Amino acid sequence: MKRLTILDLQKKKDQKEKLVAVTAYDATFASLVDDAVDVVLVGDSLGMVIQGHENTLSVSLDDMVYHTKAVNRKLTHAHLVVDMPFLTYQVSKEKAVQNAGTLLKAGAQSVKVEGGVEICETVCTLTKLGIPVMGHVGLTPQSVHQLGGFRVQGKESYQKDQLIRDAKHLEEAGAYAVVLESIPQDLAQEITHRLKIPTIGIGAGVYCDGQVLVIYDLLGMDPQFQPKFLKRYANLSETIQAAVQTYAREVREEKFPTEEHSFH
Ligand code: KIV
């Protein structure tokens, strides 16, 4: 099967077909989601859901390369976009090119960066050099301390205007799509209407061109994490805990393994 390209993703917006994106961080999940979605994101959310940190700031380029290689080995259909972690693209355009190139060498088909007008020169440099870029505005988790926490953005009218400008500038700088995270629905609708490139929402309402969710969230792996924007499509935390408890009990009661699981 042919891997989807940024041109295929644009075609979907043009044909009013919704884009479906999900995160994956390892080979097993990559092969499980590949057929069902258009885009797989190796998100720096791995700092939280894989590494157990409170935010994404400590994720390194080496971490992203490791997970990108694992995911890329199992994708045959979905487009693979990879987050550039904190401080791998903000310091200089040279560093950004070098680091984005490293992710492409690891198997990424495109990279994602957080921020608006302030990173557009970098986006322009990357895209002119042939490195496709997905933007990310609204709640940008790498700015969690500046934003004062993981909070909905763009509620005030001055913020709305700024976010529209950010998205528009990203498009002009050459971004092929933009993630809109945790912003009011009407603002996401306005941005989606004004942009030719696809918008991909998470906590941005029903009018975006596509949606993205963290795979562990949509599968219900963390019973504590219940934000308004999340719909759980499974309750795997209960399934996994019940399975492991049954396994533990059977080992302790000498019900597993049986003759059936033994070599003779
Ligand atoms: O890191 C991530 O998983 C993301 C998505 C939530 C958009 O940026």
Image: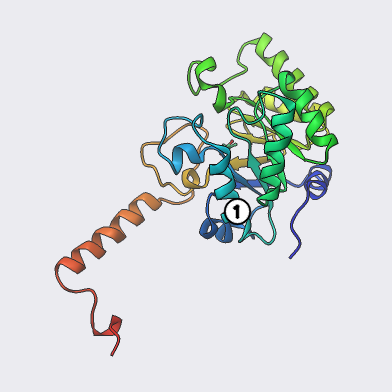
Q: Quadrant of the N terminus?
A: bottom right
Ligand 1 quadrant in view? top right
Residue 205, by quadrant, is: top right
26 left or right of 92 in image = left
Q: Quadrant of the C terminus?
A: bottom left
Residue plotted at (77% across, 40% down)? 132
Residue plotted at (60% across, 53% down)? 69
Report the residue marked by disc 1: 69
Query: Which residue in the rendered view is the most extreme toward the left?
Result: 253
* Disc 1 residue type (three-letter): Lys
Image height check: is 117 above or below 158? below
169 left or right of 150 in image = right
Count residues near mark 1 (Cα–Cα under 10 Å), then give few for <14, some for 14-19, many for 20+.
some
Query: Which residue in the rendered view is the most extreme toward the bottom?
Result: 264
Residue 209's x, y, as percent? 72, 39
Residue 99's x, y, as percent? 67, 37
Residue 38's x, y, as percent? 69, 51
164 left or right of 254 in image = right
- Mark 1 residue element: helix
Residue plotted at (58% across, 39% down)? 61
Q: Is residue 221 visible?
A: yes
Residue 163, by quadrant, is: top right
Image height check: is 19 above or below 30? above
Number of marks: 1
Residue 31's x, y, as percent? 58, 61
Query: Which residue in the rendered view is the most extreme toward the top?
Result: 158
Q: Is residue 23 visible?
A: no
Image height check: is 153 above or below 33? above
Residue plotted at (66% across, 47% down)? 20
